[in-house]
Amino acid sequence: MNTIREHLESVREQIAAAESAAGRPAGSVRLLAVSKTFPAEDVAEAFACGQTCFGENRVQELASKVPALPGTIEWHLIGSLQSNKAAKAAALASWIHSVDSEKLVRKISAAADSLGKTVNILFEVNSGEENKTGFRSADDLRASLEAALALPGIQVRGLMTMAPLGSDETTLHRVFASLRAQRDALEQEFGVKLPELSMGMSGDFREAIAEGATIVRIGTAIFGGRQSLLK
């Protein structure tokens, strides 16, 4: 059985190959190891192999791991976030990828400002799945960005999306290229830099890198099949 170290080395090699194939500089894509449902021991093993950025889906699970692991880990919350858990998320995570409303923007801002910290946020854009979260309206996305740019405690770093489950290669490229185009349009409209595109997971990160991903969220290819959710 391959170890987490071997899986990490393989994923890093595949990311490097995808960067090269897309004509992008080496190191232009950051690997976010998605550790949701996996024990802290697995995170510690990956950390010992040089992986410093980890993503969790649930605030409760993040709260159980942060105090048990090295303080130099950069934690990203990537799952859907309810506004009543925004304060806890702001306290635990350096990055929140799943911001999908102006209300949530304001909650995170207030919490981070009260803590004297700055939280990096990404706006999640829905790729067309009714049962998934994320902005569906371009007008709502623009309004939330405009609000966020005037608020303390947060820094908007870019956009995030997930491709529809079971998408073919053509659809993957279309979804990821669309997110890049939306980002570019927002940068031009608001005169700001939004450098990050969080898109691509274990099954589609190559297509995402080809279309400009700067963060790929990979769990299964590193840690293996999902464990049962922590209680």
Image (cartoon, rainbow, N blue to C red):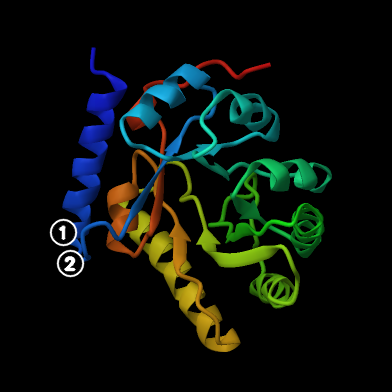
In the rendered structure, find residue 228 and report the number of the disc placed on it: none
Q: Which residue sits at x=68%, y=63%?
A: 154
The quarter in which the N terminus is drawn is top left
In the rendered image, residue 171, in percent from the top left (x then y), is placed at: 37, 56
- Position above or below: 155 against 215: below
Q: SS for tag 2? A: loop
- Position above or below: 38 against 129: above
Q: Distance between the residues labelled 1 and 2?
A: 5 Å
Number of marks in the rendered image:
2
- The answer to whether the residue labelled 1 contacts the one labelled 2, judged by CB atoms less than 8 Å apart, is yes
Query: Which residue lies under the disc numbered 2?
Result: 23
Q: SS for tag 1? A: helix
- Callout 1 environment at 10 Å: few (<14), some (14 to 19), or many (20+)? some
In the rendered image, residue 136, in percent from the top left (x then y), is placed at: 65, 63
Q: Quadrant of residue 181?
A: bottom left
Please give left or right for residue 31 compared with residue 129 in the image.
left
- The amino acid pointed to by label 2 is Gly
Q: Residue furthest top?
A: 1
